[in-house]
Image (cartoon, helix red, strand yellow):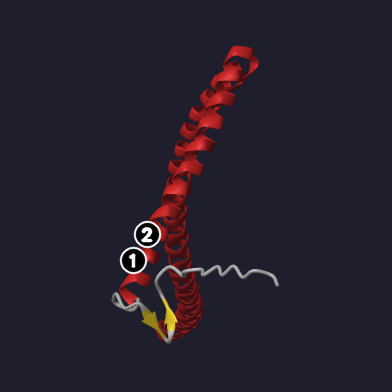
Amino acid sequence: MKKAIIKIGLISLILLLISVSVWLAIEFNQKRLDIENLQAGLSLERSLKAAMQKELSSTKDELDKVKTELENTQKQLNEVNKKFAVAEGNNAKLTEEKKALEARLHSLKELKQAIRQVKQEMWQERYQQLLAKKEMQKQIDAYKLAKGNRGFLLKDSKPTYKPTVKIEVRPGY
């Protein structure tokens, strides 16, 4: 009986060892599958990370482009605002001048004075034109004199001095 108990103990021990080894094999396979799943998930995560980094770099490039466009637009806006401010200033001045001119032209006395002033300006302009014409004629005369015949009385067989007119009176027979 002792042998039978030992045999039963050995068989139960072998069964226990087999069941433990099967359980260990199942656990090992389970752990291996878990590791493979984790590795597949890791590679998937790495590919997602690479794609996100690519997208991030392209987004950074686009952001840089937008920043430069924004800076250029800000500069243009500042220039336009400066021009607009100058134009507003000029507009204010012109508005004041317009009001002054309207007030002046609505008054009969001021209107007559404005007409006189315009006539005087026209006369001054004509006078300046006359002076310019006289000056031009002086230059032309000086040129002709310099080009002239240097004081000789004949040039090209023609008299250059005042022509003398001879009037002969003959009795009519």
Q: Secondary structure at mark 2?
A: helix
Quarter holding the C terminus is bottom right
Mark 2 = which residue? 138
> Residue 56: horizontal and vertical position, in percent?
45, 67
Residue at the right extreme?
Answer: 173
> Residue 168: horizontal and vertical position, in percent?
56, 70
Task: Identify which residue, 109 or 34, lies in the foreground.
Answer: 109
Mark 1 = which residue? 142
What type is the residue that disc 2 sits on? Lys
Up the image or down, 101 lies above or below 27; here it is: above
Label 2, label 1: how far apart the Cα atoms are: 6 Å
Up the image or down, 101 lies above or below 128; here it is: above
Task: Identify which residue, 107 or 63, lies in the foreground.
Answer: 107
- The residue under the point 50% across, 28% down is 92
User: How many numbered marks appear?
Assistant: 2
What type is the residue that disc 1 sits on? Ala
Quarter holding the N terminus is bottom left
Up the image or down, 76 lies above or below 20; here it is: above
Residue 107 appears in the picture as rendered: no
Residue at the front extreme?
Answer: 173
> Residue 10: horizontal and vertical position, in percent?
42, 84
- The residue under the point 36% across, 63% down is 139
Q: Dots 2 and 1: beta carbons under 8 Å?
A: yes
Mark 1 Cα within 10 Å, few/some/many (few <14, many 20+)? few
Task: Identify which residue, 3 or 143, lies in the foreground.
Answer: 143
Q: Toward which corner of the image does residue 142 lie, by quadrant? A: bottom left
> Residue 20: horizontal and vertical position, in percent?
45, 79
Q: Secondary structure at mark 1?
A: helix
Residue 47 appears in the picture as rendered: yes
